[in-house]
Amino acid sequence: MRHSRQREAILAAVRGTTCHPTADAVYAEVRTKIPGISLGTVYRNLRVLVEAGELLAIEGAGGLSRYDGCTESHYHFRCDVCGRVIDVDEPVDDGLDGRVSARTGLAIRCHSLEFRGVCSGCQAQRLDGTANEHPRA
């Protein structure tokens, strides 16, 4: 993979946050450093970085992807209220692939697991009766 100034800036933008940004959020961040960059360039380079294993794409409802700079195997939590994606600090069950493969006969390469529910910020807003002002991350 050929490295470019744009690609390095996009990679740095994703790796520099834990919020799992969308392509639009990456674009907004990179534009502060490279004002002339196009949204198409950001999308194209995100795809190349995912294909090269430099980033993970986390597919969401409605086809909206979020990007993760941590390529190690790990789990995620997605808030049903604000849509935020959070890394879950829980050991990955390395034996799950083998157990499911043995039981089903499927040739499993890997698995991804996403927990769903309500994040602590949205829970707190529900408890104090305020409207959901938690930004969609």
Image: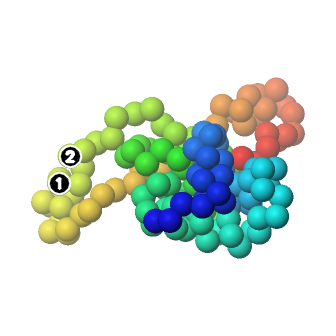
Q: Position of residue 4 (x, y in %)?
A: 60, 61
Q: Which residue is mark 1?
A: 98
Q: Position of residue 33 (x, y in %)?
A: 78, 50
* Quarter residue 135 falls in: top right
Question: Relative to 26, does residue 106 appear above or below in the rendering?
Answer: below
User: Is residue 66 among the parts visible in the rendering?
Assistant: no
Disc 1 packing (10 Å; few <14; some 14–19; many ≥20): some
Query: What label does residue 13 carry, if any?
Result: none
- Left or right relative to 81: residue 11: left
- Inter-mark Cα distance, 1 to 2: 5 Å
Q: Are marks 1 and 2 in contact (CB under 8 Å)?
A: yes
Residue occupying the point 78% across, 32% down: 125
Q: Which residue is mark 2?
A: 95
- Left or right relative to 74: residue 50: right
User: Is residue 36 among the parts visible in the rendering?
Assistant: yes
Question: Relative to 40, does residue 136 appear above or below in the rendering?
Answer: above
Out of 43 and 116, give the one closest to the viewer. Answer: 43
Q: Secondary structure at mark 2?
A: loop
* Quarter residue 16 falls in: top right
Q: Amino acid at mark 1?
A: Gly
Disc 2 packing (10 Å; few <14; some 14–19; many ≥20): few
Q: How many numbered dots are placed on residues in this image?
A: 2
